[in-house]
Image (cartoon, rainbow, N blue to C red):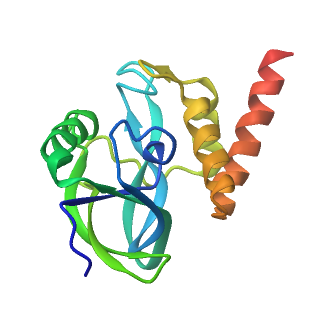
Amino acid sequence: MTMNSLWVFGYGSLLWDPGFAFTERVCARLDGWHRSFCMWSIHYRGTETHPGLVLALDAAAGASCAGLAFAVAPEAAEATLAYLRARELISSAYVERRLPVALDDGRRVEALTYVIDPGHPQYCGRLSPARQAEIIARAAGARGPNSDYLMNTVDHLAALGIADGELATLAARVRALMDRAAR
């Protein structure tokens, strides 16, 4: 394992909006987890009365999730950790874990990672892709439309050369629903 003050694994909005300074950014893979729209968003991309959906890491045997690992300078680690806890643990649906991540350059690091608590009321891991698209197409919260969150994530994954067919298909469904609604 490579030592650094703090590594952070990003798989959703951290890809395009980390919100903290980093000294290194490397494509990485986390095994045993998959990226999934399995968490109700009642703050950032939805409301309590009209929840949206956000990505979370859901445990699954044989799964892996490609994303980014960010190295944080030792002098910025404490402030970064405080920032991420305020941002990610807003409703305690995520659990903070330090998990082994394989960097594309061959290094292995332990990275701070936010995974879903499947026992939390915001967990919704069994929604069909059609239902996910309906929710994402209409929801909005404090950080804007739920569809922006999805499209930004898909665009940034593509720019990194990371294929995620499920998200690309979901984005196409959401675009079609939004186009229909606009007519």
Frontmost residue, 39 versus 144: 144
- The mark total stands at 0
Frontmost residue, 40 versus 2: 2
Residue 34 lies, with reference to residue 157, above or below; the image says: below
Q: Residue at x 58, y 45 (%)?
A: 153
Q: Is residue 145 left or right of residue 10?
A: right
Q: Residue at x 83, y 25 (%)?
A: 180
Q: Is residue 158 left or right of residue 8?
A: right
Frontmost residue, 164 versus 26: 26
Q: Choose top left, top right, bottom left or bottom right for residue 158.
A: bottom right
The location of residue 40, given as percent across then percent down, is: 39, 37
Residue 153 lies, with reference to residue 112, above or below; the image says: above
Residue 38 lies, with reference to residue 49, above or below; the image says: below
The location of residue 127, given as percent across then percent down, is: 51, 49
Q: Residue at x 74, y 42 (%)?
A: 173
Frontmost residue, 127 versus 175: 175
Q: Quadrant of the N terminus?
A: bottom left
The location of residue 12, given as percent across then percent down, is: 47, 48
Q: Is residue 77 left or right of residue 60?
A: left
Q: Choose top left, top right, bottom left or bottom right for residue 131.
A: top right
- Furthest toward the left, the residue is 78
The location of residue 143, given as percent across then percent down, is: 45, 22
Q: Is residue 159 left or right of residue 117?
A: right
- Furthest toward the right, the residue is 183
Q: Quadrant of the C terminus?
A: top right
Residue 45 lies, with reference to residue 12, above or below; the image says: above
Q: Residue at x 33, y 80 (%)?
A: 108
